Image: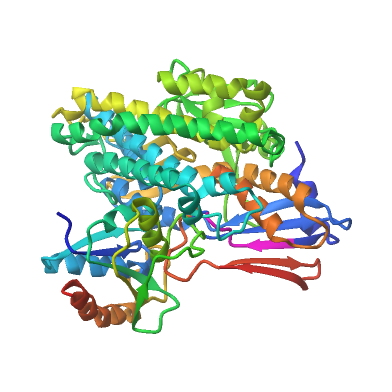
Amino acid sequence: MTDASELETARAPGLKRVVIETLTRVEGHGKVTLLLDEGGHVRQARLHIVEFRGFEKFVQGRPYWEVPVMVQRLCGICPVSHHLAASKAMDQIVGVTALTPTALKVRRLMHYGQILQSHALHFFHLSSPDLLFGFDSDVTRRNIVGVAAAHPELARRGVLLRKFGQEVIRVTAGKRIHGTGSVPGGVNRSVPPAERKILRAECGRITEWSREAVHLVRRLFEQNLEEYRAFGSFPAHSLSMVRADGAMDLYHGGLRARTAAGGTLFDHVDYSSYWEQILEVVKPWSYMKFPFLLELGPEDGWYRVGPLTRVTSCDFIPSPLAEQERRDFLCFDDGSAARATLGFHWARMIEMLHAAEVIEGLLDDDDISGDELMAYGERQARGVGVIEAPRGTLIHHYRVDERDQVVRANLIVSTTHNNEAMNRAIREVALRYLDGRTLTEGLLNHIEVAVRAFDPCLSCATHALGKMPLAVELVDADGTLIGALRRG
Amino acid sequence: MAAPVVVFAIGNPSRGDDAIGPELAARLAAAALPDVEVIVDFQLQIEHALDLEDRRLAVFVDAAVDAAPPYELRPVRACRDSSHTTHALSPAAVLETFERCTGQAAPPAWTLAVRGEHFELGAALSAVARANLEAAWPRLVELGQA
């Protein structure tokens, strides 16, 4: 892999910079800088994102039992993931090593509801416009409204899949947003039988639609194989959580890291001491940290997380329909889809199908309506919670003092894990589509498609009306603006 | 049966003036107007289109950096706008999604855009935003009783 240090403009003043400000359809604000050499070739890509550091400060001084509710304010897209990761960390704080069956299954149901709704949103709202209309199509057409106009049934399914996931969250967390269902040591409610019955009645079509979505992505790959195979693709190490038997498990398990060549770096590692395997470095040009696998070092140890990693790293998926789709995915075109950046979309739909199957199974399980909600243990000072969130591995790490107040917090979110991988994907795309010093809508579209495959969530930005312009600037090495493109 | 008026209050209560929407929603819920359902969320999403079914009126309440203080009441129509900028949809796009998915006309809708200034994480509602909110409140009640 390339040594990132050799690409720094600071050490190569002859490089030019191309700045693409505020990506569309990613959560919050982002800005891309492309560093060019004298020949106009892209040497490095940098995705700048305002990160969550402020939030880690924000929770300091708060009592630990408030944290699982507070952290939901991190993100409007996956609050449940933060709710559960924080709850798992606080389970350790209150000394609970095993939840009651009801608490564990209610939390799992909540989590898979979140996976389903988030993946549905991403595919039907954010990515399908790219995939169905093509990367060069009119930007105003490439949004959910465009999809609704051209593919009304697909758009309707997207809305209803998302709504179903939200309903699963509502019955387990208490509310559609800002739920309080998961608490340190367990849950504060189980699922009433009447609610189970209503949700269960919908499971057949939810599973079928999810399966058809997997097949839709497959057809898109088949129809655009040359482009999809190569688009923004590069070899990467991987990190994910797997169950003790190697199965995909998005709620709990041990850490597994694999090299780009397929070797195993570590497996079934207890995440309570994740820092023995993963470290983070900072770089002067980004608010976002750069995590790396300690064994490989900061330059070569960057890695990828998320659906593509999880589907390719697990030994099997423990639900029949999704497992069959996983096998087909791995075999497709000699494994090219499983190596492609756009393979994220296919893997994401396989996970959505898995989530639908898991939800169906849990709704048939009487334990989710049980009344043993809490477990108890001996108070601890440190807690680490890890969950496979929709976008990838999510780590919450807290220290709590004797007055029950949080004194230290460290969060590593999936977008941070994927930081360097996204830069690599952008660079690969820019190498192919940037034509000298000219910024084009086409280049911007392609960069967005590459970033969106990772589904980064930059939710620390606010969402007040009128705050989301899109600007592209071409800035020479001496700081002179030589071109600009604006959208929104 | 759905309440005739649905009010979508948008914003993150932990981000300074972004809390304008949730604050007004809490007040509206406490007022318990008989014809109003209040839906609070961080941002508008595709599933909110389904919350428009069988409504006489929809009101979107949000903090706005581009509204003239203290607030602007803007009519909003279903539109293929370019609200592709984040995971969030614009009110117009929610209405459009509703029309496309159901084949029905969206209800009449307004955006109550209350001017906000500061959106830092952990910040409280600013004094300016609170004053703007107070000015907007009677108008919101009027809409709820329309």
Is residue A412 visible in this depiction of the protein? no
Of residue A132 and residue A28, the one placed in the foreground of this image is A132
Q: Is residue A206 above or below residue B131?
A: above
Question: Which image quadrant is residue A361 in?
Answer: top left
**Residue drawn 25% across and 59% down?**
B39
Residue B58 as seen in the image, left or right of residue A308? left
Residue A456 place in picture, x, y as percent:
53, 48
Residue A476 as seen in the image, left or right of residue A393? right
Question: Which image quadrant is residue A444 in?
Answer: bottom right
Instruction: Reply yes or no: does residue A20 show up in magenta.
Output: yes
**Residue drawn 36% across and 44% down?**
A162
Residue stretch rendered in magenta on the structure:
A18-25
Residue A292 place in picture, x, y as percent:
61, 38
Of residue A442 and residue A99, the one placed in the foreground of this image is A442
- Give the quarter of the figure containing the N terminus of chain A: top right
Residue A473 place in picture, x, y as percent:
70, 67
Q: Is residue A467 above or below residue B138?
A: above
Residue B18 as seen in the image, left or right of residue A458? left
**Residue drawn 71% across and 55% down?**
A443
Q: Is residue A333 above or below residue A345?
A: above
- Give the quarter of the figure containing the C terminus of chain A: bottom right
Residue A261 place in picture, x, y as percent:
69, 24
Extreme top residue here? A245
Q: Is residue A308 above or below residue A397?
A: above
